[in-house]
Image (spheres, rainbow, N blue to C red):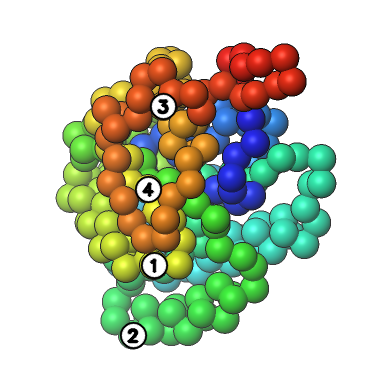
Amino acid sequence: MNFPYNFIAIEGNIGAGKTTLCHRLAGQFGCTLVLEQFTDNPFLPYFYLQPERYAFPVELFFMTERHKQLQEHFAQPDLFRTFTVADYFFVKTLLFAKNNLGEEEFRLFQQLFKVLNATFPKPDLLLYLHRPVEVLLRQIRKRGRDIERNISGAYLEDIQNAYLEYLKTETETPVVVLELGKANFERDDTVFQAIVQLLNERHENGISFKTLHDVPAQSPALYHRSPTGAKKT
């Protein structure tokens, strides 16, 4: 299957399943993955314990590491891969910083962000995985990371609102907000194929809202054409 996008970013709140979806896409389509290395941030455990004290160093570290990763990837693209999928987009850096930093710190952070953000391309498509906060909390507890034990529903709600507030202003990139609820695309192939269908469609710039019911169950886009006919991917 040839997707109509060269660079797809999968976004969502903490626990939405971004990285899991990226791995499934790579396993089926052989795309290049750009995955966030959040566990390498030495300030993150301290941030969850004392957010006001460690917010600035944790966000600064995330920003510089994301910038370095994206810059290195697009400087040396893999010509033998079909497309790139990332489990974040760089503007995420600014959204989390706005939520976590004080006014003066955010003003400085924003100036640094604007310089770095101009050095690599934006995604051709942004897919945002939306889940209720209670589902996010359940998935966070299920994966059992020690540094995430103190994440609250209120914090997740703030992050969710920050994402949606920004995405509604995005006019230069197609943005698809997909309501997943409890759907499990890791185990349920029907759900996964519905997401593949969305990624295989051309979307207009700006935000659109989708549910799994919006995707036809037997979509011809889940097949690719060969000289001898159509077969499942």
**How far apart are the two marked residues, 4 and 1, measured between alpha carbons?**
12 Å
What residue appears at the point 43 percent right and 84 percent down from the top-left corner?
A: 108
Q: Is residue 109 left or right of residue 98?
A: right
**How far apart are the two marked residues, 1 and 3, measured between alpha carbons?**
25 Å
What residue appears at the point 51 percent right and 28 percent down from the top-left corner?
A: 221
Q: Is residue 19 left or right of residue 160?
A: right
**How far apart are the two marked residues, 2 and 1, measured between alpha carbons?**
28 Å
First along the sequence among labels 1 and 3: 1
Give the SS element for disc 1: loop
* Callout 1 crowding tier (Cα within 10 Å): few <14, some 14–19, many ≥20: few
12 shown above or below 120: above
* Callout 4 crowding tier (Cα within 10 Å): few <14, some 14–19, many ≥20: many
**Which residue type does callout 4 highlight?**
Val
Q: Nearer the viewer, mark 2 or mark 3?
A: 3
Residue 194: mark in rendering: 3
Residue 176: mark in rendering: 4
First along the sequence among labels 4 and 1: 1
First along the sequence among labels 4 and 2: 2
**How far apart are the two marked residues, 2 and 3, measured between alpha carbons?**
44 Å
Give the SS element for disc 3: helix
Residue 171: mark in rendering: 1
Do labels 1 and 3 touch, CB within 8 Å? no
Q: Is residue 68 left or right of residue 23?
A: right
User: Which residue does the numbered mark 2 point to in the structure image?
Assistant: 104
